[in-house]
Image: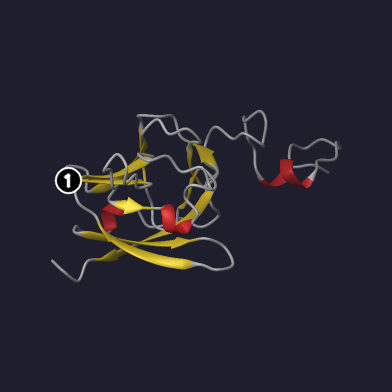
Amino acid sequence: MSDDGTNQPQDESTKRHTSWLGDAASPRMPVEPDQPRPQTARLAAPWRLLLQIGGDNQTTVGIEVRDHVVLGRSDPVADYYPDLDLSPYDGQEGGVSRRHAAIIQDDESKSLYIEDLNSTNGTRINGFSLEPRRRYRLRDGDELEFGRVRMTMRFVRSPFK
């Protein structure tokens, strides 16, 4: 018997998650994990982020979070250098824009947000595509994708402040 009291069989995906999303290949809302993750407000500023970049040959990069941190690719010809240059992590091959996204610290809500800066190949959190120029709250353990460059974000307390 199905969960709704009828004798209709349900496939495994219908039993586990109810969703009003259309096409699973292009999700429009983030899927919440089974276990709750800590909110950004639980970690007092100043924040330091550890970004675990890549798959098999994973690299961890630490950055200090200020009011506004731009992620992208450097352009020496135009004399442009983002706060975190993703060029060494296959940024160009992975479709990272020069000014791809920004991580913003909101002192009022004590939270961190990410904003896609109208990048060519988009930004995703946990597979959810972000609308350009709109802020989305970040949580510890979020998987971020800038174009095809994938990373997992971890919050830690900064030892420098």
| Nearer to us in this view, 3 or 148 | 148
In the displayed orientation, state which residue is furthest to the bottom. 159
Residue 101 occupies which quadrant of the picture?
top left
Percent coordinates x, y for residue 149 in the rendering? 51, 51
Percent coordinates x, y for residue 53 in the rendering? 47, 60
Q: As drawn, is 51 to the left or to the right of 70? A: right
The residue sitting at 42% across, 53% down in the picture is: 87
Q: As drawn, is 133 to the left or to the right of 33? A: left
In the displayed orientation, state which residue is furthest to the left. 161
Residue 104 occupies which quadrant of the picture?
top left
The kind of residue tagged 1 is Asp
| Nearer to us in this view, 9 or 134 | 134
Q: As drawn, is 117 to the left or to the right of 157? A: right
The residue sitting at 38% across, 52% down in the picture is: 139
Task: Please identify the quadrant where the N terminus is shown.
Answer: top right
Residue 13 occupies which quadrant of the picture?
top right
Percent coordinates x, y for residue 150 in the rendering? 51, 53
Residue with the mark numbered 1: 107
Task: Please identify the quadrant where the C terminus is shown.
Answer: bottom left
Percent coordinates x, y for residue 82 in the rendering? 29, 47
| Relative to 76, residue 154 above or below | below
What's the image's color scheme? secondary structure
Secondary element under disc 1, as helix, strand or loop, is loop
Q: Residues within 10 Å of mark 1 (few under 14, many from 20)?
A: few
Q: How many marks are shown on the rendered structure?
A: 1
| Relative to 119, residue 139 above or below | below
| Nearer to us in this view, 103 or 139 | 103
| Nearer to us in this view, 161 or 3 | 161
